[in-house]
Image (cartoon, rainbow, N blue to C red):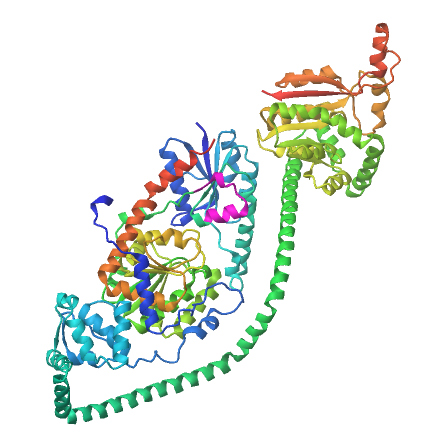
Amino acid sequence: MARIAILNPFFTTADAVSNDVFGMYTALKKSGHEVRVFANEWTTDGVGVLSVDNIQNFISHRDDILIYHYSMGWNVGLKIVQEANCRKVVKYHNITPPEYFAGISFDYENICRAGRLQLIDFAHLACDLYLSDSEYNMWELLLAGADKSKSFVVHPFHHIDRLHEIEPDATVLETYNGRTVNILMVGRVAPNKGHISLIEAFAAYHRKYNPDSRLLIVGKEPEHLESYSSSLRKLVSGLHIDSAVVFTGCVSDEQLKAYYLVADVFMITSDHEGFCVPLVEAMALKVPIVACASTAITGTVGKAGLVWKERNPHLLAESINFLVKNESLGAGLGLMGWQRYEQLYTNEKIEAAFLNALSNLT
Amino acid sequence: MQIDEINYPEIDVDQLMARIREVVERRGVDLSLTSKSSVSAVPGSVVSRSTLLLDLPSPPLTLSPEFDARTDGKYHVKDLLKYHDRDFVQHAYQAILKREPDERGYRHNIEMLRNGQFNKIDVLASLCFSAEGQKHGVKIEGLRTPSLIRRLGRIPLFGYFVRFTVALVRLPASIRSQRQSEAYVLAQLQAVNDHLNQTSAWIAEHLQKHGAALEELIRREGDTQEELKQAEDATGLASARVRQLSQILQQTREELIQQDAYLKSIGTETPGLASSIAQSSIPTSERRESWDSLYAAFEDQFRGDSKEIRERLKYYLPFFREAGKTTDILDLGCGSGDWLNLLRDEGLQARGVEVNTVMLDACRARHLEVIEAEMLAYLRGLPDSCMNVVTAFHLIEHIPFEAMLELFEEVRRVLRPGGLVMLETPSPENLVVAACNFYSDPTHHKPVYPHTLTFILKNLGFTDVRLQFLHPVEGSPFMDDDRLEPLHMWFYGPRDYAVIAAKA
């Protein structure tokens, strides 16, 4: 039976890319394949990660399969895919366009630029399969020149099963459960996540509809993006809503679950998302969604949330008001999200789509 | 829980969003107002871009008190009469019908109120006594009597007397109400006036504060087209340059790896082989430069016509087609790249290895993929089974026997099973070549006897070893007489021969 190597620059825990790699590994292992994960660096060894230096020996036969998880610029990875004499699969996770980091982080800007440049290289490699996290990612790949007949959408594997299993953090529940309406946003504090729109919409809701409300911004604040984080805090301060906005920083899975449980509405106004796993987490935990339409968000949410084409704070604020004021409406929308999760985004559904896509390999 | 066990809500998201939009529009909110995206087109602080939008001097002006919806469905008529116009209609719907007004109902009621045909009592009564209102069962204390009087007042003739009598009886109350209304309107105007003054002061202050920034933005706006064009040009150039640099970087990295491998390896070689390779491949840079130029010039003069060489090399192409090998082709000692060029023209993906810097430059000028490295060191650095074809034309006669053996071993190791090795070298069976022409090239070491070569390859485990003599000399006077055949072979026989073998 053909051997399968999954190649990814960095493998760790609690990271969307690594969750996806782990999911692919588990699915392939379960279906009886000889599969190994190769990486340049890794912080966890749950799957027996091997150094990238050994990959050539592992996939030496023409029938072997190399799955490259493309989520950042990595010349070594590109070269290995170029030179591999076996069947090649690229899984495209998307890379944030560098423009978002201009004037904020030179390093991030350069890393993203280098990563985006490789999109054309990968698209022209004539790989045997191109798998994309979302329709939007697939569109980017096709635009770069990938073969449409070899392109499929396979949503990323995730850690939601674990979220369902674990107990929520008691301190978070105790602190934020109560009368105050909680609006939740989950995601790295980075400029592509549209925090300005988020904060402005919340300010409009807080002022006009409900001063007893709170915005919970859950997500890591990278050191290199400190100027962006501090600008957001100044914005919050300038809008006189300091006491109503909480930046939680990086949280554990238990804390994350607790934040979803106390949330009345999940609001996301990102400018650029390749898929947006937090949306699926919100759906799985039945939190109603209010969002701005951009990149992959529209496709991920579908008709299971209020997705506005306009980035208008008043529309977003009124949407929150509708969902909060009318509890059955909020709960109903939350259930519609859960239904969409069950239909499209469970790890079982993703596994089936993944194996089905791989069956197109000749 | 299974999906089909759940009783799903039927929420039409589009309809819900249309309702939300309607409510927002009714408040007179400008929906063209767009919150800033995070794209940092102009480097600068997020705050400076955002506070222009929403950092208002005070909460928005509201002229009506907040509406307090009762959960028990009981109101006094005064709870609703204190609202006016749009707010009144909206709150009346919310209180009595427990929903937002529909478009038609809203327009109708506003119109009737504004043209005087309805007063607020009429609106409340029409909602309260409608079928939908009755269904909700909301009680409005103090509505029944005035509503009855209003209805009596509409009866022809009799209604006139009713209205007249009510007006007379209510005259003192009406005058008081008129005064209250006047005071209320004046107070509202005062509030509007205060708010406008406050807003104007805030705008003036912020205009002054952000004046410089605005001017800068306007100036930038003016330059945008030009900058965009420049940026587009620069991006194109930068992309091309980045690719070029990446290629160079990749080549440099490969060369460094080879050099490193080479330096490591010469420490472990037998002294004779090591010194011979070391001497031949890494002379001082000055010597090497001059030697490279000299040898390139020599090759140029003695190797023959380029066109003819290309034709001769075409002999090997069918072997590629036959074996289906199109990629991962390595040419050792690629010279100035005639063979690589032909392969590329045929759509085959190949790279060359060469030490002569002048020839390397020639290859690069033809945009061929070449690596500057000593061939044995380069081969040692390659992983097992990574090549489909290795070619070495007029190379083995340049190296000592031990090096040749190691070369074949390395070639066998890097070839994939079924991979081909193709060699070409001068044939010593032609005596003119063996005794004379061979020595025209001062870097030639020894001629290799054809059957010795095939024997070595077979012995090293290669299969399908094929020997083919090539390039006979034209104009042989010994052709017509069989007895002179040996003479023909010795003096006019093939000048070169090829050996093609496969890895088992």
Residue B278 % position (x, y): 73, 34
Q: Give the residue drawn at x 34%, y 85%.
A: B192
Residue A298 % position (x, y): 39, 54
Determine the image quadrant of residue A314: bottom left
**Residue A277 against residue B476 in the figure, above or below:** below
- The answer to whether residue A150 is magenta is yes
What quarter of the picture does the N terminus of chain B occupy? Answer: top left
Q: Residue furthest top?
A: B483
Determine the image quadrant of residue B312: top right
Residue A341 % position (x, y): 31, 48
Is residue A168 in sight in this rendering?
A: no
Q: How many labels does the image show?
A: 0
Q: Give the residue drawn at x 85%, y 33%.
A: B301
Determine the image quadrant of residue A121: top right
Front residue of A109 and B63: B63
In the drawing, does residue B122 fall left or right of residue A44?
left
Front residue of B373 and B44: B44
Q: What stretch is highlighted in magenta?
A: A137-152
Chief SS of the magenta region: helix
In the drawing, does residue B274 fall left or right of residue A104?
right
Front residue of A216 and A348: A348
In the drawing, does residue A140 fall left or right of residue A258?
right
What quarter of the picture does the C terminus of chain B occupy? Answer: top right
Residue A26 % position (x, y): 37, 38
Q: Give the residue drawn at x 40%, y 54%.
A: A297
Q: Which residue lies furthest to the front in this view?
A: B157
Is residue B441 in sight in this rendering?
A: yes
